[in-house]
Image (cartoon, rainbow, N blue to C red):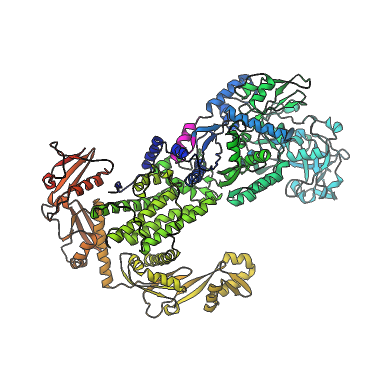
C-alpha cells in the first residue's frame, strides 16, 4: 500500500510547527540545504544588522519574513543562498543603556571610570537579548545562520571598516571641519541628519520678538522673532531679505520705531503703530546695531559682527522678516555669516555650550545652566532692558533624540566628514542601476534624499565603537590613516590584538616631519558607517575572501523597512559608490511600518498590541507570515495590525488547505481498502473536464507566481496563492466529491484522486517559501506518493509550469461557470432560498455567445452545485425584461468636468439610450454633451423588469452577465429540500460519531406521535435516504436492548425528531480490540449478514486506525500466542490483541 498516514480530524498548527522546528534541528535541514546546494550558482543576500539590546517586534518579524520568503524561493529555484545573521554592537543604543544602568552623566564620568571599564560594561550587554532573538527568528520559520554570524565588534569586521575609511582618505573624500549638526545633549554626541529626522514631535516653545537698536538711530529697532531665546547671547548678526518690502512703524506712545516686513506688521500685535516709512530690505543691509549681550562685543571690530546681512532664504509666512543670526547654532545662520565674512571656517567657534547642553564660562551669567532652562531668565533680562517687544508661545515640530527622547540642539561641532555632496551625480547613477519594490520609494523618497544629500559627519564623540583610524600631529598638519592592523603595527612597532579605544588610544606613531609623535583622534565611527560597510566587512574584505566577495557583489537582494531610506539603504549606497563606483545591491523590497490597530505607533507603555510570540503560539507562525506579507505593508504602505486578521488567515487559508489534504488522504486509504490496490499517481492524461481544469488552473498559478516572484512582487502573489485553497475546496472537491469517492467507477476515481494529489503536491512545493511549517508537516505524508526521497520539502525544487497541462479553453469555461454560481448564491442568500432547497430554472444572459456556450458545456456541474433543475442561456435580454443602466463615477467625472459634471451625470442617469450604451460596451467610449467618456468614468450594469413568464424570478448581475433565478416554490421542490435536509442530518450524525465511510451503522429516526409532513416524506423516500447516506434507516424509537453510539434531537420544518446512531459493533458485539501504547481501538471482523473480513483487511484497519505504516507489525493474543495469517478472526471476537 502507499503507506499514507491517517490524518486526524483536527490540527493544532502551532503545536505541529514546534514539531517541525525540532525536526529541522535534529536533522540539520538548513545545513543540509546549504551543503547540497554549495556547487550551484550563488544568490547573494545581505542582512541588515539589528541591535540585540532590545527585543524583536513586529517590524523585525515582517522584514525577517520577507527576507526568508525571498531567500527560500531563491534556494528552491536552484541557487546557493548564504544567509548570515548580523549584529549591530556599537554606538549610542548600547552606550545609552549602559549610561542608564551605571549612572553615567557625561564624558567626564567615563574618563573617571576608565574607558576600558566602560567599554567592558558595553560589551557585557550588547548581546543581552540575543537568545530571545534567535528563538523568535527560529519560531517564525526563518532560516539564517547564527553560528557563522558577523558582529560589528569583531576585530576582523572593524579592520575592514578601517580599510574602507582609509580608501576614502586616499580618494580625497574625507575632511575635518566644523559643522552645525543635530546634537544630542543627553548622549553628548552629534547625530547624522537621517538620525535627526527619525523622531520629530510637536512642542510648545517660547516665541519672542526682540528689538535690536541700530547704531545710527538708537530709537529705530530691527525686530527679530525667535523660538530659541537661549541662542541670543551668541547672536552675531541680523538678516533681511533685500528684495522684500519693509516698513518703519512708530509707536505713537513711546516714539520707538520698529522695522519689520510690511506683510508681517500684524505680528507685533500693537494697534498704536503708524507706518512712517517703506523701503526694500536692501536699505538696511550693512547697518550695524548694538549687541544685546556683552559676551562677544569684541567681534564687532575684529570681524565686522553685529551688522545686517542679506538673506534670500527669508520667507513671508512666519516671523517678522528680520532673522537673528547665531552662526554656530543654525545651519543657515552658519552659511549666511560665512558668506558675509562674519566668521571663517578656521576661526575659533563662538559656541558657548558644552556637550551636555550647558553654557560654558564664556556666557558668565548663565554658566552651568542647561540652555533650555535658561530661556525664562534670558527673556526676563531682555524685558528689564527694554529689548523684549513681545512675548508669546509657538507650537511647532521639533527634532528629538531617537534614543534618549530629549530635544536636540543644533550646534557646531568639529567632525570628520565624507564629501557626499561631490558624489551626488554618482549616487544617482548607482540608484538608477537598482530595482526597488515599490518603485516610487526609489524614485521619490530615496531619489530626493540623494539629490539633496549633504556631507556626512561620520565621527562620534563617544567610546564604544570602532575608533576612527586617523593619527594626527598636535597642529593637525600631519595625518596618517592606517588601513589595517598590520599597517598600524608596522607604523607603531606594537603588537595589536583588538582595536577598540582602550586598545589603541595609547598607541602613537613617530612623526616623519619632525612633529614628535602622532596621536589618534578621540572620535569613533558613527555606527551607520559600520552597518554601511557590512557587505565587505562581514567577509573581512580585502584581507580574506577577496575573490568570493568580488564575484558576488553587488548583492542580489536586500530588504528592510521604509525608515531605512535615510539609514542603512543610504549608507550602503554612499560607501559602495565611493569605494567601488557601483550600487551595493540589485534588488530591494522596502516594507512599510506595522502600527497598532488604532493607527498609532506600537508602544510597550500603552500596551496597544498583542505580544508577537503569543500570537504565534496561538495561531502559528505560518498564519502570521501570510497575514504580514499579504497586506499593504509589502507595498511600502503602513499596516494596522489586527490579531483577528491572523485568525482569519487560519480560518480562510490554512484550515481549508488542511481539510483538502485530509480529504485526499482519507480517500486514498478508502480506495486502497476497497480495491485492494496500491494508490499511485496516474500518468495517463485525464479526459475529465474538471480534472483538466484544476491541473491547468494550478499550472497557470505556478506560471503566474514564478513571473511575479522574479519581479519581487510579493504583494501580487500571496492573494492568488491563498485564494487557491478556496477554489480547490469549494469548486473542485465539492463538484467532484462523488467521483473521488468512487461513485462513478474505479477508473474515474483514480483519475480524480491523481488530479487532486498532483495539485496538492505542486502547491505544497510552491507554497513552501511562504508557509514553511505546514508544507513540511504534510510533505512527510505526500512525499510517499510524490516519488521523492527528499527528507524535507525545503530540499525540493520549486515547481515549473507544465505547458502540456495548461488549457486556457477549460480555464475559461470553468471561470464562466464559477462566475454564474457566485451570482446564483447571491440571489439565494438575498431571497432566503438555502442551497438545500431545489429550484426550477436559472436563466443566464450574456452578450458573448462563447460565455454561454461555456456554461452549456458544464451544465451538469453548474446545476448540481446550484441545486437548480434547468439552465437557460440567452443573448436576448429584452425577452426577459433586462435593460442597460449607466453608472457614473462621480468622483472621476467631477475631477475632470468640474461644473459640467452635474448635467453629464443627469444625461447618463435619465436620458442615455439603450443603443448608446450597447455601442459603449463595444467601443469603450461614449460622447455625452461634447465630452468623451471612458469605461473608467462610466460603468454599465443591468436592470431587471420581469418579462412575460418571469414572475417570481429574482436577478443579480455583474458588468457582463445577468442571472435570473426562479425563486418560486411548490410542494415537490419543498419535499426535495426536506429530503436533502434529512440526508444532511444523518451525515452530520455519522461525522460527529467519527465514523468513516467504511464503518457500518444504523440510524433510528424517532418522530412525534402525531403524523407530520416530514415523517410522511421520510417513509416515502426511505430508500433514497439510505442510498444517499450509505446508512440503513429504521423508523421509530431505539429498540430495547440497543445502545446508541450517539443520539441527537433536532428540528426539521418545525417538527421535533430524534436520531439514534447505532454502530455495527454495538449491534453484534463482533469486534476485536487492539492496543498500541496508550491507544485502543475496536475493529469489526464480521458484519451482521455474516461476511468476514480477511487477515490483510484486518491488518490494514489496524495500521490505518493506529497510524502504524512504518516498518513491520505483529499482533499478540492475551495468552501470548501470535496472530497468524491462518488465525480464525471471528474466534478472537471480544478479546484484546497487543501490537508488538
Q: Is residue 899 above or below residue 556?
A: below
Front in this rendered view, residue 450 or 425? 425
Q: Is residue 447 above or below residue 503?
A: below
Front in this rendered view, residue 438 or 340? 438
Task: Give x and y (percent) for residue 997.
Answer: 24, 55
User: What residue appears at the point 36 percent right and 69 percent down from the top-left corner?
Assistant: 859
Task: Give x and y (percent) for residue 306.
Answer: 83, 36
Q: Is residue 184 visible?
A: no
Q: Is residue 44 left or right of residue 341?
A: left
- Asked if the magenta segment contains residue 135, the reply would be yes
Q: In the picture, which quadrant includes the C terminus?
A: top left
Count of numbered marks = 0
Front in this rendered view, residue 1100 or 993? 1100
Task: Give x and y (percent) for residue 285.
Answer: 85, 43
Quarter where residue 842 is shown: bottom left
Q: Is residue 1130 visible?
A: yes
Q: Is residue 86 left or right of residue 835?
A: right
Q: Is residue 987 above or below residue 501?
A: below
- Asked if the magenta segment contains residue 721, the reply would be no
Front in this rendered view, residue 280 or 562? 562
Quarter where residue 614 is shown: top left
Q: Is residue 963 left or right of residue 111?
A: left
Task: Give x and y (percent) for residue 890.
Answer: 57, 66
User: What residue appears at the point 75 percent right and 21 percent down from the top-left corner?
Assistant: 511
Residue placed farthest to the right in the image? Answer: 216
Q: Is residue 733 above or below residue 953?
A: above
Magenta residues span 128-145
Amino acid at each position: 500500500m502507499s503507506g499514507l498516514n491517517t490524518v486526524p480530524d483536527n490540527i493544532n498548527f502551532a503545536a505541529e510547527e514546534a514539531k517541525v522546528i525540532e525536526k529541522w534541528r535534529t536533522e540539520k535541514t538548513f545545513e543540509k540545504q546549504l551543503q547540497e546546494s554549495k556547487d550551484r550558482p550563488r544568490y547573494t543576500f545581505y542582512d541588515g544588522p539589528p541591535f540585540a539590546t532590545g527585543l524583536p517586534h513586529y517590524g523585525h518579524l515582517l522584514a525577517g519574513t520577507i527576507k526568508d520568503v525571498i531567500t527560500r524561493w531563491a534556494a528552491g529555484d536552484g541557487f546557493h543562498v548564504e544567509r548570515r545573521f548580523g549584529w549591530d554592537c556599537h554606538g549610542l543604543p548600547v552606550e545609552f543603556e549602559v549610561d542608564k544602568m551605571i549612572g553615567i552623566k557625561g564624558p567626564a564620568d567615563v574618563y573617571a571610570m576608565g574607558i576600558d571599564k566602560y567599554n567592558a560594561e558595553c560589551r557585557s550587554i550588547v548581546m543581552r537579548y540575543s537568545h530571545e532573538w534567535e528563538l523568535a527568528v527560529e519560531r517564525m520559520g526563518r532560516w539564517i545562520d547564527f553560528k557563522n554570524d558577523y558582529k560589528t565588534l569583531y576585530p576582523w569586521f572593524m579592520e575592514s571598516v578601517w580599510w574602507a575609511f582609509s580608501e576614502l582618505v586616499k580618494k580625497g573624500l574625507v575632511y575635518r571641519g566644523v559643522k552645525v549638526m543635530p546634537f544630542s545633549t543627553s548622549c553628548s554626541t552629534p547625530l547624522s541628519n537621517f538620525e535627526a529626522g527619525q523622531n520629530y514631535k510637536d512642542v510648545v516653545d517660547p516665541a519672542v520678538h526682540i528689538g535690536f537698536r541700530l547704531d545710527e538711530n538708537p530709537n529705530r529697532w530691527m525686530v527679530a522673532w525667535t523660538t530659541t531665546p537661549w541662542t541670543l547671547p551668541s547672536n552675531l548678526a541680523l538678516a533681511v531679505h533685500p528684495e522684500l518690502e519693509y516698513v518703519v512703524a512708530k509707536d505713537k506712545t513711546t516714539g520707538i520705531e520698529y522695522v519689520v516686513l510690511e506683510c508681517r506688521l500684524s505680528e507685533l500685535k500693537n494697534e498704536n503703530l503708524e507706518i512712517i516709512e517703506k523701503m526694500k530690505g536692501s536699505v538696511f543691509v550693512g547697518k550695524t546695531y548694538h549687541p544685546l549681550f556683552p559676551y562677544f562685543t569684541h567681534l564687532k571690530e575684529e570681524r565686522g559682527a553685529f551688522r545686517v546681512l542679506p538673506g534670500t532664504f527669508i520667507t513671508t509666512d512666519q516671523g517678522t522678516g528680520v532673522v537673528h543670526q547665531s552662526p554656530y547654532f543654525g545651519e543657515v545662520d552658519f552659511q549666511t555669516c560665512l558668506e558675509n565674512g562674519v566668521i571663517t571656517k578656521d576661526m575659533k567657534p563662538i559656541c558657548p555650550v558644552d556637550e551636555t547642553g550647558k553654557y560654558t564660562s564664556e556666557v558668565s551669567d548663565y554658566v552651568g545652566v542647561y540652555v533650555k532652562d535658561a530661556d525664562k531668565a534670558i527673556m526676563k533680562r531682555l524685558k528689564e532692558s527694554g529689548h523684549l517687544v513681545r512675548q508669546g508661545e509657538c507650537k511647532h515640530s521639533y527634532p528629538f533624540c531617537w534614543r534618549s527622547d530629549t530635544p536636540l540642539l543644533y550646534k557646531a561641532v568639529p567632525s570628520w566628514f565624507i564629501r557626499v555632496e561631490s558624489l551626488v551625480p554618482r549616487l544617482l547613477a548607482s540608484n538608477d542601476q537598482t530595482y526597488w519594490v515599490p518603485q516610487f520609494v526609489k524614485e521619490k523618497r530615496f531619489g530626493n534624499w540623494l539629490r539633496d544629500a549633504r556631507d556626512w559627519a561620520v565621527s562620534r564623540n563617544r567610546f564604544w565603537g570602532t575608533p576612527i583610524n586617523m593619527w594626527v600631529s598636535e597642529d593637525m598638519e600631519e595625518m596618517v590613516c592606517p588601513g589595517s592592523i598590520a599597517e598600524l603595527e608596522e607604523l607603531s612597532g606594537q603588537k595589536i590584538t583588538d582595536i577598540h579605544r582602550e586598545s589603541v588610544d595609547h598607541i602613537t606613531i613617530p612623526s616623519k616631519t619632525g612633529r614628535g609623535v602622532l596621536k589618534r583622534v578621540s572620535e569613533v565611527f558613527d555606527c551607520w558607517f559600520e552597518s554601511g560597510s557590512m557587505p565587505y566587512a562581514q567577509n573581512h574584505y580585502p584581507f580574506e575572501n577577496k575573490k568570493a566577495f568580488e564575484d558576488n557583489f553587488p548583492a542580489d537582494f536586500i530588504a528592510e523597512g521604509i525608515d531605512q531610506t535615510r539609514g542603512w539603504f543610504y549608507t550602503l549606497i554612499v560607501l559602495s559608490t565611493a569605494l567601488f563606483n557601483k550600487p551595493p545591491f540589485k534588488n530591494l523590497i522596502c516594507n512599510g511600518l506595522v502600527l497598532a490597530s488604532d493607527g498609532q505607533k506600537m508602544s510597550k507603555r500603552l500596551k496597544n498590541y498583542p505580544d508577537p510570540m503569543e500570537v504565534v503560539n496561538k495561531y502559528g507562525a505560518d498564519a502570521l507570515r501570510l497575514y504580514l506579507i499579504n497586506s499593504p505593508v509589502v507595498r511600502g504602505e503602513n499596516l494596522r495590525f489586527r490579531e483577528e486578521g491572523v485568525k482569519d488567515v487560519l480560518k480562510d487559508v490554512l484550515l481549508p488547505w488542511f481539510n483538502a489534504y485530509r480529504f485526499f488522504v482519507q480517500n486514498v486509504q478508502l480506495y486502497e481498502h476497497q480495491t485492494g490496490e496500491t494508490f499511485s499517481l496516474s500518468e495517463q492524461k485525464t479526459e475529465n473536464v474538471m480534472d483538466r481544469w484544476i491541473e491547468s488552473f494550478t499550472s497557470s498559478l505556478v506560471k503566474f507566481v514564478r513571473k511575479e516572484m522574479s519581479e519581487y512582487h510579493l504583494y501580487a502573489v500571496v492573494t492568488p496563492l491563498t485564494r487557491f485553497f478556496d477554489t480547490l475546496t469549494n469548486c473542485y472537491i465539492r463538484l467532484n466529491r462523488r467521483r473521488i469517492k468512487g461513485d462513478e467507477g474505479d477508473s474515474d476515481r483514480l483519475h480524480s484522486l491523481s488530479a487532486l494529489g498532483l495539485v496538492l503536491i505542486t502547491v505544497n512545493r510552491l507554497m513552501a517559501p511562504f508557509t514553511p511549517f505546514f508544507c513540511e508537516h504534510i510533505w512527510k505524508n505526500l512525499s510517499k506518493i510524490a516519488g521523492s526521497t527528499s527528507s524535507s520539502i525545503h530540499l525540493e525544487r520549486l515547481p515549473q509550469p507544465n505547458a502540456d497541462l495548461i488549457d486556457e479553453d477549460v480555464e475559461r469555461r470553468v471561470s464562466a461557470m464559477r462566475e454564474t454560481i457566485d451570482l446564483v448564491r447571491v440571489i439565494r442568500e438575498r431571497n432566503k432560498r438555502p442551497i438545500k432547497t431545489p429550484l426550477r430554472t436559472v436563466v443566464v444572459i450574456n452578450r458573448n455567445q462563447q460565455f454561454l456556450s461555456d456554461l452549456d458545456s458544464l451544465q451538469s456541474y453548474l446545476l448540481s452545485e446550484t441545486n437548480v433543475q434547468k439552465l437557460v442561456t440567452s443573448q436576448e435580454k429584452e425577452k426577459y425584461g433586462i435593460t442597460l443602466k449607466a453608472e457614473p463615477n462621480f468622483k472621476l467625472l467631477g475631477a475632470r468636468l468640474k461644473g459640467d459634471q452635474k448635467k453629464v451625470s443627469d444625461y447618463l442617469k435619465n436620458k442615455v439610450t439603450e443603443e448608446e450604451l450597447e455601442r459603449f460596451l463595444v467601443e469603450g467610449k461614449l460622447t455625452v454633451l461634447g465630452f468623451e467618456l471612458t469605461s473608467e468614468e462610466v460603468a454599465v450594469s443591468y436592470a431587471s423588469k420581469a418579462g412575460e413568464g418571469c414572475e417570481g424570478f429574482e436577478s443579480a448581475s455583474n458588468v457582463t452577465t445577468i442571472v435570473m433565478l426562479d425563486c418560486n416554490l411548490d410542494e415537490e421542490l419543498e419535499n426535495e429540500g426536506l429530503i436533502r435536509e434529512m440526508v444532511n442530518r444523518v451525515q452530520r450524525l455519522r461525522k460527529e460519531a467519527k465514523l468513516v465511510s467504511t464503518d457500518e451503522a444504523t440510524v433510528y429516526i424517532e418522530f412525534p406521535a402525531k403524523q407530520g409532513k416530514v415523517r410522511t416524506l421520510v417513509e416515502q423516500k426511505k430508500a433514497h435516504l439510505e442510498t444517499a447516506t450509505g446508512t440503513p434507516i429504521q423508523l421509530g424509537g431505539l429498540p430495547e436492548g440497543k445502545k446508541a453510539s450517539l443520539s441527537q434531537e433536532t428540528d426539521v420544518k418545525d417538527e421535533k425528531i430524534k436520531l439514534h446512531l447505532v454502530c455495527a459493533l454495538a449491534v453484534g458485539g463482533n469486534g476485536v480490540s487492539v492496543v498500541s501504547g496508550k491507544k485502543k481501538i475496536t475493529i469489526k471482523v464480521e458484519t451482521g449478514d455474516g461476511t468476514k473480513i480477511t487477515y490483510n483487511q484486518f491488518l490494514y484497519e489496524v495500521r490505518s486506525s493506529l497510524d502504524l505504516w512504518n516498518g513491520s507489525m505483529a499482533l499478540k493474543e492475551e495468552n501470548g500466542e501470535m496472530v497468524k495469517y491462518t488465525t480464525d478472526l471471528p474466534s478472537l471476537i471480544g478479546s484484546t490483541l497487543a501490537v508488538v
